[in-house]
Image: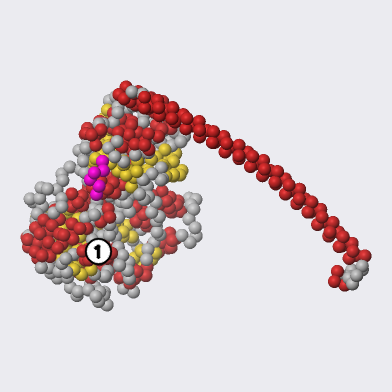
Amino acid sequence: MHALNHALTSRGHTTVILTRDEADTRARFGGDVATAPTPVFPWAPAEREAYLASIQNLLAGREHDLTDDDPVHALRATLRTCDALVVAGGGNMNSRYGWLMYERMAALAIARSLDLPTLVTGQTVGPALTRPDVRTLVDGLSGTLAVGAREDATQRLLERLLPDGLVHRVLDDAAFLGDVPVPTGVAPSPSAPESSAGAVVVTIAHGSLGVDDAALPRLVRALDDLAERSGAPIHLVPHMAVPGTRHVDIEIHDRIAAALAAPAVSLDVEHALVAARRAREAAIVVTTRYHPAVFAAEGGVPALAIAADDYSRVRLAGALGSWGLDGAVLPLADVEVVPDLLSRRLLALWEGRDRVAGALAAAAPALAAHASAFWDTASDAVATGRISGDARTSSHLPEVARVVAPGAEVDVTSPSTPVVSVVVRTKDRPTMLARALDDIAGQTFSSLEVVVVNDAGDAAEVDAVVAQVVGLEDRVRVLHRIVSTGMEAASNAGVELARGEMLAIHDDDDTWDPAFLARSVAHLRHHPTDRAVAARTAIVWERSVDGVERLVEEGREIFEPHVRLVTVLDLMRYNRMVPISLLLRRSVLEEIGKFDESLSVVGDWEFNLRLATLGPVTVMPGEPLAFWHQRRAATDELGNSVIVDADAHLDVDLRLRDERLRRHVAERGDGDLMYLTRFMHERHEELAGHVLAVEQRIVDLENRLGRALEAIGHETREAGVVGLARRKYWAARHRLRGGRGKGADLD
């Protein structure tokens, strides 16, 4: 926002900054900046969709449920005083941060209703977008004058979704933040070094080092190795924190500083322009956050970025790749798997820093000219309401020399195959398949592939759904089965194509929490002897509306809330683990075999019985991470087999138990089972006798209680009659004595 505000005001425009926190914005930009509040959207997808629909109904003059004090009215009033709306770059146009995207879409919708020209500057869009969010995004952006894409991946996606000529390849808004003057009175934190020149500047986002910060020890070791080799001080520079606290970035920075053997300074959060300057003047930058990489490139500073997920990878690779730097982003999954990878890459970057710095410096003039030209285009667009023809034909970045990050050229130890293979079974349920693929694309763990097994359903329909998915490009393969031979056969067919070391079966109607794979993979890595792990599961009751186009949730309940370990004994009663809850090592199949294709239903239960013979399966504590969707009323292709085929479940369950029992008798004889059956029968008879005795005692107690209550009632009634007579006596006596009170009676 600092860059956009400077670009527009320096070109003669007056700005009003829309913000959720006006006081904070004025503090950051200076007290004379004009601000206005913007509506805050809820986090839940259904709620944010409903809020935007209400706003759209208001704008269209239709019935809506917005109150008179809803912030949207103030936003409309503010925009009526403006000549244009510019949505600043922020990179939050995806489903994970959907509430932020919907805030922007609401502002664009209001501006469009007022016939204001609109323009969107440098964005990261995706990589994961659900289909409802794609529709919302396309509707919001299609009416703008231009949309800035700050990565090649975003440009490709937007050019696929939006009208021709609308998308411009740009740098991040803050790519040349050094041009923005620091406001008077803004200075480094009093407790911080005045400058970070020559230092290793490190910025680590809270939660970006894996589940429970599993990669933190490897980062500490790598920084200590770098400090020993370079002699450079380590400055931990936060980019997000709660002022006056040591939370968010500062909290993890404090932990890193405490663990380092080398001297390190964990700084307080500073003004954005001061923090940016530290990255521009550093010796090298190590970051899991986006903007330190942007600032480092502007300053010609070599950077190594660690990407915790696909969202981070796309942004960081785009930021550094725009400057010609390739291979400078390490996936967190690689750091977790290869113990010394981070140390090797940091030491290589230090040794080759001059080569990288020279390449960045050489790219700067052309990129700076491109950035300035885009701001000129934006300035003209908001003033005239149109984009010039020349601007539309210059929507690509200038060519710059490419340089491979030191160490990346020879590093062949990073895993090339996905860690997890997700097998999705589907048949003639395109709406559910679309939701399932959106769900997988939204996982925070990114080292995955998807194998969609179309179990003899409509092939064209499946291909169309897969073609539209956002966030899984090049990671989805489809197997079309000509003849359906059952769910377990479909699972086995998918497993045959899978390449990952871990496997998950994801039925097309179920979903995961975004952290399901990250937490499940982390558990199996931390517990190498565990063959599998299960997540706490919630049953999601839902129904379909508008035919099969929309699924509406009706309620939730926790499935098996008290189970912490799933054992053979537990599973002998009934299945305690549904497929969506389970992640297992691929090697398990070599120990127990594949899914039993002879079973039309309950194949997952039979597989789990074999799995549990290898050892109990841990159910991860905490909130549910797996969601087992069920539809009570559905009897067609939308139905759940456990409901629609309930009779088959009972029949196959009985036959499976009988088959196992017959096998046991054939192998070991029936003596022990006959004894056990007789023993259980006697205990059952004994228990039944106790139950009858208890029931008789309960009947006796009920009879006694009834008689007691009747007696109490009788005495209560008698007491009532006596009390009435006594009151009548005293009233009559009072009248006979001429109204004198009892106290005057001298008899």
Q: Is residue 375 above or below residue 646?
A: below
Q: Residue at (76%, 48%) from the top-left corner? A: 714
529 drawn magenta: yes
Amino acid of disc 1:
Arg
Residue 453, position as x, y percentages in the image: 28, 33
Q: Which residue is labeled 1 in the image?
A: 255
Is 222 one of the magenta-colored residues?
A: no
Q: Residue at x 89, y 70 (%)?
A: 745
Q: Position of residue 293 (x, y in %)?
A: 19, 60
* Span highlighted in magenta in the image: 526-531
Which quadrant of the structure image shows residue 742?
A: bottom right
Percent position of residue 710, x then y: 72, 45
Q: Which quadrant of the view contains residue 435?
A: top left
Magenta span: chief secondary structure? loop
The answer to whether residue 17 is left or right of residue 289 is right
One can see residue 643 in this view:
yes
Q: Quadrant of the N terminus?
A: bottom left
